[in-house]
Image (cartoon, rainbow, N blue to C red):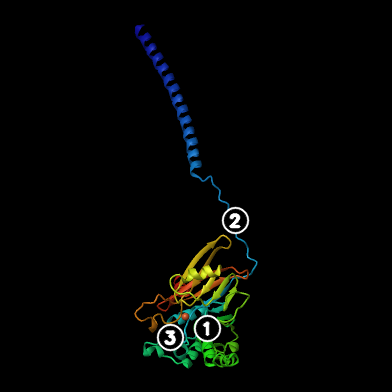
Amino acid sequence: MTTIAAKADAASILGAAAVLDKKREQQYREELKARDKQIEILSDRLDAMKSSRWSIPLSRRKNSKSGRPYIRVIVPDSHGCYIDSIPLSAMLQDFEALDIREVVLLGDHLDCSGFLAKHHRQNYIKQAKYTFEQDIDGCNDFLDKVQARCPRATFHYLEGNHERRLETWCIDQSLKEIADAEWLLKQVGAKSVLNIEKRGLNYYKQGQKYMGLELPCTIKLGHCYFTHGEYCGVGAARRTLQKFGGNVVFGHTHTASEASLKTVDQGVMKAWCVGCLCELQPMYLHGQVSDWSHGYGVQIAQDDGSFLQLTIPLIDGKSYLIGMGKQFT
Ligand SMILES: [Fe+2]
């Protein structure tokens, strides 16, 4: 009897323990479930904190009503026979690949040295390397080559200070007799010796104003002015920009540079000098190393006047527009 009772007690204890274990297990499961739920909530909250609560409003690109963009090129100082044929070749190769609608020649495409530059002291025999006749031939050949590669383009030729020497010479020779000076200029002026009319180029003289602008020999195409330039040195781009108060491309300094300015009225505007095409170290600089650089300009322009300005460096006979771009095609 005692044994039977003891067995029954043990069974009863085991049964009670099993019930207790089940309850605890259930309790643990519920606790685990509650914690999982809490983790899920906290995780969602963390994700929400990581994502931005700022929404930056983006505007859609305005569709231009001005049709397809077109190419305008800007050709800087080449200086007659003092042109460097290596960068010239690179630039002309680019022109063959571009469908150019407008060409702006920034002036100083005749050098007019020698007797036309008697205000300059000649120090070296080599400075008298080319005759005026050779200078003219050199410039005509340059214009022939550029025009051949831009057969459908409108040309704008801005007179530089070097072409201006011809008018100065005519006035000097005619002893300031206006009629004689004008007659002389018709015979030997840049328009005549470069066959400007026959070539169909628009020619802008240094002594005349155009397009209602305040500065002589300056034009405006779209939202950009073009001028030969007057200032020299490191601050030439900034000074030009301050005087123009608008986007402007110029030559004259032979050094590629640019400046940017923002005004309350006009917003952001820029000035660019695109370099030159002539020899980089002229004799008259003596031992002074020039900062000059070879290059030219490209504008991707639209009829509404807007444009993208690119200054194309020409280094070691290579254009950094198409010459470099080809390596990625
Ligand atoms: Fe020049």
Helix, strand or loop at mark 2: loop
Residue position marked by numbered label 1 in the rendering: 146
Q: Which amino acid type is shown beneath numbered disc 1? A: Val
Mark 3 packing: few (<14 Cα in 10 Å), some, or many (20+)? Answer: few
The residue positioned 49% from the left and 69% from the top of the image is 239
Looking at the rendered image, the quarter that the N terminus falls into is: top left
The percent coordinates of residue 245 (x first, y second) are 55, 67
Alpha carbon separation for disc pair 1 and 3: 30 Å
Residue 108 in view: no
State the residue in front, 315 or 119. Answer: 119
Look at 50% across and 87% down and name the residue there: 139
Q: Kindly report which numbered mark, 2 or 3, lies closer to the viewer in this rendering.
A: 3
**Residue that badge 2 annotates:** 59
Amino acid beneath label 2: Ser
Residue at coordinates 48% horizontally, 79% vertically from top-left? 91
Compare marks 2 and 3 and give the one earlier in the sequence: 2
Residue 234 image-quadrant placement: bottom left
Residue 218 lies, with reference to residue 80, above or below; the image says: above
Residue 183 in the figure: left or right of residue 279:
right
Disc 3: which residue:
120
Task: From the top left corner, tell me how far across and down residue 308 is, in percent.
Answer: 54, 68
C-alpha separation, residue under disc 2 versus residue under disc 3: 58 Å
Would residue 65 be visible to someone looking at this image?
yes
Report x, y in % for residue 173: 52, 92
SS category of the residue bearing label 1: helix
Within 8 Å: ligand 1 and the Cβ of disc 2? no
**What SS does tag 3 mark?**
loop
Relative height, residue 33 to residue 149 (above, below):
above
Q: Amino acid at mark 3?
A: His
Residue at image x 54%, y 47%? Answer: 54
